[in-house]
């Protein structure tokens, strides 16, 4: 199950669309040359702001792998508090490194207003989009250190590309470049469908979204903004539909799992959407049985409307990652892994993992590297001294979150560990 962070293509296209919308919404400059400089400045500023928080990747060296990435990416730069210095830094860079923009900003209040809006919207856009998937952010640090998970949208979401990319492409003046961009926007989803990562019905949804945004932009004329508004509105509607679908899917999952095992307490259901597909979802359920001293992770595929689209008909390129077998590893007696392939409409359970609560709690107390890793892990799976977050794969070798605790034996505890709240504090007996 792949889901790292919102892709930078989505961030970039959304940033460019919002930057263009800001430019077309602010009163024009008195001459064409100033108007051209302002447009370039606002598009560049909003594009940069909508990607800027991901520069936290340079901080990953502060901790050994994989802790550096897991704890510092989506870290401090993805908070409202640290959005303020990022905004000031971006504005300063524009002022210092762009003479034409500096001259315009010194004389035009419309340009200054546009720059403030472009940078502010760009940064908020990044945080909002990163919230949408199951990786999570903690935007209210230091007031609230909890991870917040949207569980709504897939990492590579073509609805965002089409809704924002089509009106932007239609604004390109060069015919050859405009046609090339439109062909790419059509060809990439088609390639995804051919390789089993996108359901064919999703192409119809994407075509309708692109057509609506394209027609609106064409009717708006060279300086209109209707296509941008329509495209961004389509994104908001899609997110709302996905949010409702995720909540409904979690309720369906809870009911099904309770029926199968009334003694199990469902603590969490990590929901990962399929691209451009409101019906298909991957899930990882975290259950606890305190009386038995055990917890369980169940991974699978869920369909919101199995009579229309059964779980087995969801795109195989994404579902197949749930059915692989873990490598042969010596497992402590306290841990049990049971591969299961069973269709139970509307749910396919692809794998089950059962672990010992006492084992996890003891290791958390004894091993500071595991303790640090638990500040990230939402669905912790232990295979010997290999710890993995099952949100991303049930196979440790294919999971970027996997940490080999044996590699840190005898080493001093790491410093620079951010104090994010434990996503699975409930498994550790700490409450939530």
Image (tube, helix red, strand yellow):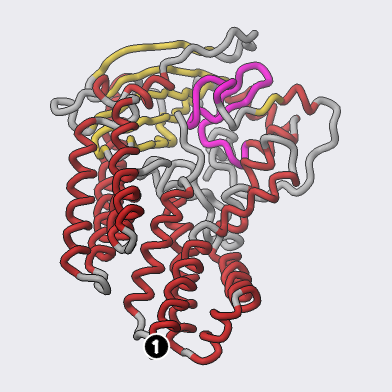
- In front here: 142 or 106? 106
Locate the N terminus by quadrant: top left
Relative placement, left or right, of 110 versus 179 is: right
Label 1 secondary element: loop
Image quarter for residue 155? top left
Vertical arrangement, residue 247 with respect to residue 165, above or below: above
Q: Which residue is pictured at 44% across the width and 18% down the height?
A: 352
Please name whichever residue, 361 or 237, is drawn nearer the observer in this view of the structure.
237
Magenta residues, start to end: 374-398
Residue 19 position in % (x across, y down): 41, 68
- Viewer-proximal residue, 173 or 85? 173
Q: Report if residue 378 lies within the magenta region.
A: yes
Q: Residues within 10 Å of mark 1 (few under 14, many from 20)?
A: few
For the image, the number of numbered tags is: 1
Q: Position of residue 14 (x, y in %)?
A: 39, 58
Please report the residue visible at 68 percent of the width from the left and 20 percent of the height from the top.
Answer: 385
Residue 214 part of the magenta segment: no
- Camera sees residue 343: yes
- Quick check: can you spot residue 88? no
Residue 187 shown left or right of residue 266 in the figure: left
Q: Residue furthest left?
A: 307
| Image coordinates for residue 410, horizontal then vertical, percent | 85, 27
Q: Is residue 253 above or below residue 169?
A: above
Q: Position of residue 111 (x, y in %)?
A: 46, 83
Identity of the residue drawn at 34% across and 32% down: 192
Residue 113, above or below 133: below
The residue at which mark 1 appears reads as 31
């Amino acid at each position: 199950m792949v889901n790292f962070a919102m892709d930078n293509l989505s961030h970039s296209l959304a940033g460019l669309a919002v930057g263009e919308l800001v430019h077309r919404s602010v009163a024009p400059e008195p001459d064409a040359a100033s108007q051209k400089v302002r447009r370039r400045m606002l598009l560049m500023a909003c594009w940069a702001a909508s990607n800027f928080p991901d520069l936290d990747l340079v901080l990953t060296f502060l901790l050994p792998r994989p802790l550096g990435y897991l704890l510092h990416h989506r870290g401090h730069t993805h908070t409202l508090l640290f959005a303020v210095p990022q905004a000031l830094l971006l504005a300063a860079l524009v002022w210092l490194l762009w003479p034409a923009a500096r001259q315009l900003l010194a004389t035009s209040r419309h340009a200054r207003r546009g720059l403030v809006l472009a940078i502010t919207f760009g940064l908020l856009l990044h945080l909002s989009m990163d919230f949408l998937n199951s990786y999570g952010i903690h935007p209210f640090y230091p007031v609230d250190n909890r991870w917040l998970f949207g569980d709504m949208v897939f990492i590579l979401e073509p609805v965002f590309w089409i809704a924002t990319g089509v009106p932007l492409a239609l604004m390109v003046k060069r015919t050859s470049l405009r046609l090339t961009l439109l062909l790419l926007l059509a060809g990439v989803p088609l390639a995804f469908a051919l390789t089993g990562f996108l359901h064919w019905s999703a192409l119809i949804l994407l075509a309708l979204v692109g057509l609506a945004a394209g027609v609106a932009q064409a009717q708006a004329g060279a300086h209109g903004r209707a296509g941008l508004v329509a495209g961004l509105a389509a994104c908001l509607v899609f997110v709302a539909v996905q949010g409702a679908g995720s909540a409904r899917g979690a309720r369906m999952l809870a009911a099904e799992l309770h029926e199968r095992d009334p003694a199990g307490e469902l603590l969490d259901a990590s929901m990962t959407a399929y691209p451009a597909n409101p019906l298909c979802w991957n899930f990882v359920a975290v259950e606890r049985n305190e009386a038995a001293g055990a917890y369980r992770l169940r991974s699978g595929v869920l369909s919101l409307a199995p009579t229309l689209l059964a779980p087995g008909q969801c795109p195989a390129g994404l579902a197949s990652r749930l059915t692989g077998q873990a490598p042969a590893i010596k497992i402590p007696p306290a841990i049990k892994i049971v591969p299961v392939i069973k269709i139970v409409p509307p749910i396919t359970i692809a794998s089950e993992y059962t672990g010992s609560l006492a084992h996890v709690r003891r290791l958390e107390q004894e091993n500071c590297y595991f303790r640090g890793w638990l500040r990230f892990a939402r669905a912790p799976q232990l295979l010997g001294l290999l710890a993995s977050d099952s949100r991303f794969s049930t196979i440790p070798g294919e999971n970027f979150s996997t940490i080999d605790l044996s590699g840190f034996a005898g080493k001093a505890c790491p410093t620079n560990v951010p104090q994010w709240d434990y996503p699975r504090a409930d498994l550790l007996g700490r409450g939530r």
